[in-house]
Image (cartoon, helix red, strand yellow):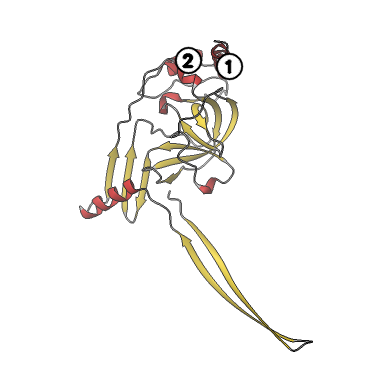
Amino acid sequence: MEINSTSIGTLAHYRLRVVGVFGVAALSVAVVHASCSRQEALSPRFIKTYETARSAGETFVEVRDAIPWRAESAEDTIQRSDVLLLDVSSGPPLTSSIMMIESWYKVSVVAQSTAIGHTYPRTGCRINKPSAFSSSDALGILGGTKTHRGITVKYTVPETTDLKSGARYLVLAWRCVDGTIRLVIGPAGVFEVAPDGQNLLPNRSRVRSNVATLFDKIRSVESIFRAVDAIRKDSAQR
């Protein structure tokens, strides 16, 4: 789905002419209805990819990026992350082209353990959620598929993961002040909650992390939040 916004503006011009002391006023109103469309912005990289595909006569192109994840302890990952329990709203994700292609999910945060005394990296909140989400929280994930003027571009990175509509997840992320949520370690920090609402399903990322190994072992959502709080408390006392 592409994000396109169209606004209809009405331009009214009023002309008032007053004649004499006591005045004879003649008011003429000319109203001009104009439609203005705000075109969706596309990133320079997406435009270059689109132009290359168009020149080659292609209607589909796939771009893959290898973004390395650094190896670190579960404790270090937790310390620099917000741990969020969130519900994904119904419906497909929206796509944007800020860096290349991003998929956005409207979410509701059910519970949160906030990173203490940690400043989010500049890139963590550099991508802001599309205005279509207004005051709602939105989880943005790099990757997705976008069609522009008959050419479809599929963008895949290790962070790319699809979330199920209506499902509940526990994620390691940065929750920015405007409601933008970004994953910290990609799918390795995304855990679907089982239908019982109490336990996590096994992490399905092909890229394993120490925190995924820890959470897969604990499984209980309540116990995970207790463990996260204990890690934060222990770190603060050092």
Q: Position of residue 116 (x, y in %)?
A: 56, 22
Q: Position of residue 58 (x, y in %)?
A: 23, 51
- Residue 14 drawn at (x, y percent): 63, 77
Element carrying mark 2: helix
Q: Nearer the viewer, residue 231 or 109?
A: 231
Give the class, few, some or many, for how many residues have Cα within 10 Å of label 1's Cα (few <14, many ≥20). Answer: some
Q: Residue at x 50, y 24 (%)?
A: 81
Placement of 15 over or under 191, stated as above or below: below
Q: Please state the horizontal and vertical placement of residue 160, each as a whole percent of the image.
A: 38, 34
Residue under the point 43% across and 54% down: 40
Q: Say which quadrant the C terminus sits in.
A: top right
Confirm whether residue 216 shows in the render: no
Q: Which residue is mark 2?
A: 75
Q: Residue furthest right?
A: 22
For label 2, count other residues whose C-alpha is less than 10 Å away and answer few (under 14), some (14-19) or many (20+). some
Q: Which quarter of the picture shows residue 212?
A: top left
Give whichever of 112, 106 is nearer the camera.
112
Give the mark, 2 or 1, whose residue is nearer the N terminus.
Answer: 2
Above-or-below relation of 53 to 104: below
The residue that label 1 is drawn on is: 229
140 up-or-down from 200: above or below: below
Apparent side of residue 70 relative to residue 134 in the rendered image (left or right): left
Q: Circles 2 and 1: CB distance less than 8 Å?
A: no
Q: Amino acid at mark 1?
A: Asp
Label 1: element kind? helix
Could you tell me how many numbered marks the image carries? Answer: 2
Q: Is residue 55 above or below residue 17?
A: above
Give the residue type that dot 2 points to: Glu
Q: Quadrant of residue 178?
A: top right
Q: CA gap, disc 2 to disc 1?
A: 11 Å
